[in-house]
């Protein structure tokens, strides 16, 4: 059974930081590209950051220079370090795993991030 379990969300003031984690089980983690998506109320889900199975990373323009994605294959965990948070970063953040050869993908249940004073 595949599980992606996000943690680390919460309430933070503008300019603050949060670190999200996504622990995977039931998959050969090192063979999966891992991504963070987010969905704000009334908006479509959008890609925030992705790290490939060999460690290459890319980011949405809106978070470049503020967010950092990383992975620990030994722990089957992907992280998202979020700094200089803005009100517009408020959303439910989802973890996604995509098999590097395609055809399989899995989603986590999401974790709420709220940026507010």
Image (spheres, rainbow, N blue to C red):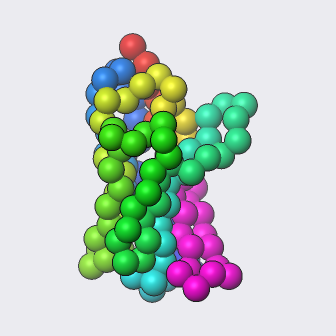
Q: Looking at the image, which residue is at 45% across and 84% down? A: 31
Q: Which residues are magenta?
A: 94-109
Q: Looking at the image, which residue is at 56% across and 73% down? A: 98
- Vertical relation: 115 (above or below) 73: above
Q: Is residue 80 in view?
A: yes
Q: Looking at the image, which residue is at 47% across and 67% down? A: 34
Q: Quadrant of residue 6?
A: bottom left
- Count all numbered tags in the image, as a single digit: 0
Where's residue 23, x and y in %?
40, 66
Where's residue 48, x and y in %?
50, 48
Q: From the viewer's perspective, is 28 left or right of 106?
A: left
Quadrant (top left/top right/bottom left/bottom right) for the N terminus: bottom right
Quadrant (top left/top right/bottom left/bottom right) for the C terminus: top left
Q: Is residue 5 in view?
A: no
Residue 112 among those drawn in magenta: no
Where's residue 10, x and y in %?
40, 35
The residue positioned farthest toward the top in the image shown:
117
- Vertical relation: 102 (above or below) 70: below
Residue 97 among those drawn in magenta: yes
Where's residue 47, x and y in %?
56, 51
């Amino acid at each position: 059974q595949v599980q992606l379990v996000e943690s680390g969300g919460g309430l933070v003031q503008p300019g603050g930081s949060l670190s999200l984690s996504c622990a995977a089980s039931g998959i050969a983690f090192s063979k999966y590209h891992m991504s963070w998506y987010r969905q704000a109320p009334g908006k479509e889900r959008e890609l925030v950051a992705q790290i490939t199975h060999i460690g290459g990373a890319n980011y949405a323009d809106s978070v470049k220079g503020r967010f950092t994605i990383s992975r620990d294959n030994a722990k089957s965990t992907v992280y998202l370090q979020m700094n200089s948070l803005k009100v517009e970063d408020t959303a439910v953040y989802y973890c996604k795993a995509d098999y590097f050869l395609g055809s399989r993908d899995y989603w986590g249940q999401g974790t709420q991030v709220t940026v507010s004073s």
